[in-house]
Amino acid sequence: MTAITATHGEFRVGKIEHIGPTQHVLRNAFVALALLSMTALLAVFYWPNASTQGAIVDELNTFRQSMYNRCGDRSFTGPAGQRLINMYKNNSDLRSTVVSQFQLLQRDSTQCEDVRTALRKAGYPVQ
């Protein structure tokens, strides 16, 4: 390494010695790589996952299909509208009610009106 030392009016270039421990370039590179890896893992696990959103919509549409097949209610035909999907995604009580009512629909003894009543109580827009 070279250094410039200044004395009154003149410059001299000379060699200086490093004071302190040697630099750990490889160690610092590994620490930076580890930090980047941890940041990437956190982003992967905590980023909103499109497949999770798709699974929620599939769950709702499966219930609607089952409700139509079992009860013949025309309001349950076709895919769910965006308003209903948003309501379903944001309301955990509604989701748990739909799942429990879907399980009840698999039984022969379940009455369709009981399912509609439970859905209304949870906030599902049933006519």
Image (cartoon, helix red, strand yellow):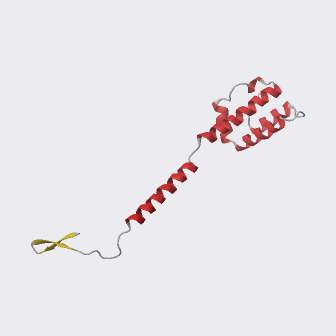
Looking at this view, name the residue that lies furthest to the left: 9
Looking at this view, name the residue that lies furthest to the front: 26
State the residue in front, 55 or 30. 30
Looking at this view, name the residue that lies furthest to the right: 109
| Residue 53 image point, x, y percent | 63, 39
| Residue 118 image point, x, y percent | 81, 37
| Residue 12 image point, x, y percent | 13, 72
- The residue drawn where x is 66% and y is 38% is 55
| Residue 61 image point, x, y percent | 71, 32
Whether residue 121 is situated above or below residue 19 in the rendered picture: above
- The residue drawn where x is 87% and y is 35% is 107
- The residue drawn where x is 40% and y is 64% is 26
Q: In which quarter of the image is the N terminus?
A: bottom left
Q: Which of the 4 quarters of the picture holds residue 110?
A: top right
- Left or right placement of residue 70 versus residue 25 in this view: right
Q: Which of the 4 quarters of the picture holds residue 116?
A: top right
- The residue drawn where x is 70% and y is 25% is 78
Number of numbered callouts drawn: 0
State the residue in front, 120 or 55. 55
- Left or right placement of residue 107 versus residue 30 in this view: right
State the residue in front, 18 or 75. 18
- Left or right placement of residue 38 versus residue 87 in this view: left
Q: Quadrant of the C terminus?
A: top right
Whether residue 50 is situated above or below residue 12 in the rendered picture: above
- Left or right placement of residue 113 versus residue 76 in this view: right
